[in-house]
Amino acid sequence: MPKPAAVGWRSLIDDVLLRRLTDYAIGVPAVRTVYLTGSYVRGMWNPDRPNVNVYFVVDHAHTAEVRAGLAEVFSQVRTETRNRGVDFLVDCHPFTISQRDEEWGSVPLLTLTTKVFDARRLPERLGVSPTIGFGWWLSNRILHGGEDDLAVFEVPPPRSEAWFRGAYAALSHYRAVLDHLPWAIDPRLHPGWFLEETCRYADEAIKDGVHFGVTDEEVISAADTAILHDWSGVARDFFLERYGPEGGWAVDAVAGMKAAVLDGEAGPSEAMAHWRDEVRVWDVVWSQYTSLARSHGMPDDLLRILTWM
């Protein structure tokens, strides 16, 4: 099996994945817009484990049809990538790793993060969290359609109850998955997969933490997006300044998890230790979030995590 560094990733991404997604969209009139965004557009993607972000905006009443159609497209993409010794999965937390085919569990992996958005929700920024979207506006490539649908993300929304509810929903989801992760993926049987999924949520939590460390004025000026786009250069200093020593520890802990994933040698005890660190990382971010929410007079239901999820 090829090593990640030896894989022709650009050919796989551009000529296989993006080509098939674009060809599908062209053939379905209900698909208004398809756009590529994220690290691949910025040229900052991970050559050891590329993740590509592609989003669809679809006419109302056709979203289920498009989701079903894309299932077939994804199957075709997987066949083509496996012919080149690379596995392909759609990034559906927490199933990206837990549902891997064991026969392909040790080969290079290409993942896709995607959503099918209902165009009827364009006036409300397609229903995504207010903390999301401006980065899509800054760095995107239109694969099909035009840029008009992306214009809803041009201005970062100020903090409001809707802003806090979006952040709360994300943190609740991360914690629900983390609480159940040692049961979903047995760390004794698959410590590497368990660590990788843990690392995904560590990365999600710490990067969401940026939004809770900036001021209201910095939200409007999109300073949080600038920090996220220059993570390696500024993240640790930012968390030390805004969160204190626990923030610096959290950034280092997540970096350590990422290094362990790439090393690929973690055993069960090390993987569980990183999981415990990730729970602590989440606690650090949650503490900052709740302090901010209280200072903005948010209702009590946004200050208590949903333990039944």
Image (tube, helix red, strand yellow):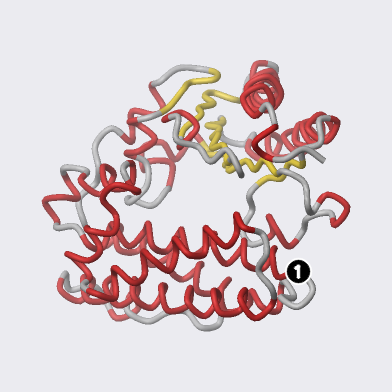
> Position of 257 compared to 185: left or right?
left
Nearest to the observer: residue 200 or residue 164: 200
Residue at 42%, 73% in the rendered image: 282
Res 309 visible: no
Nearest to the observer: residue 29 or residue 267: 267
Up-down relation of residue 23 to residue 165 (above or below): above
Exactly how many numbered labels are in the figure? 1
Circle 1 sits on which residue? Answer: 190
Residue at 65%, 16% in the rendered image: 26
As helix, strand or loop, the secondary structure at mark 1 comes to: loop
The kind of residue tagged 1 is His
Q: Quadrant of the C terminus?
A: bottom right
**Rendering quarter of residue 298:** bottom left
Residue at 69%, 39% in the rendered image: 67
> Position of 127 compared to 67: left or right?
left
Up-down relation of residue 282 to residue 239 (above or below): below
Residue 212 percent location from the top left of the image = 26, 63
Residue at 50%, 37% in the rendered image: 45
**Rendering quarter of residue 296:** bottom left
**Rendering quarter of residue 248:** bottom left
Nearest to the observer: residue 139 or residue 7: 7
Q: Quadrant of the N terminus?
A: top right
> Position of 162 compared to 120: left or right?
left
Residue 111 percent location from the top left of the image = 65, 43
Residue 239 percent location from the top left of the image = 25, 63
Res 34 visible: yes
Q: Residue furthest right?
A: 103
Up-down relation of residue 1 to residue 80 (above or below): below
Using a 10 Å C-alpha cutoff, classify the residue at mark 1 as few (fewer than 14 neighbours), some (14 to 19) or many (20 or more).
some
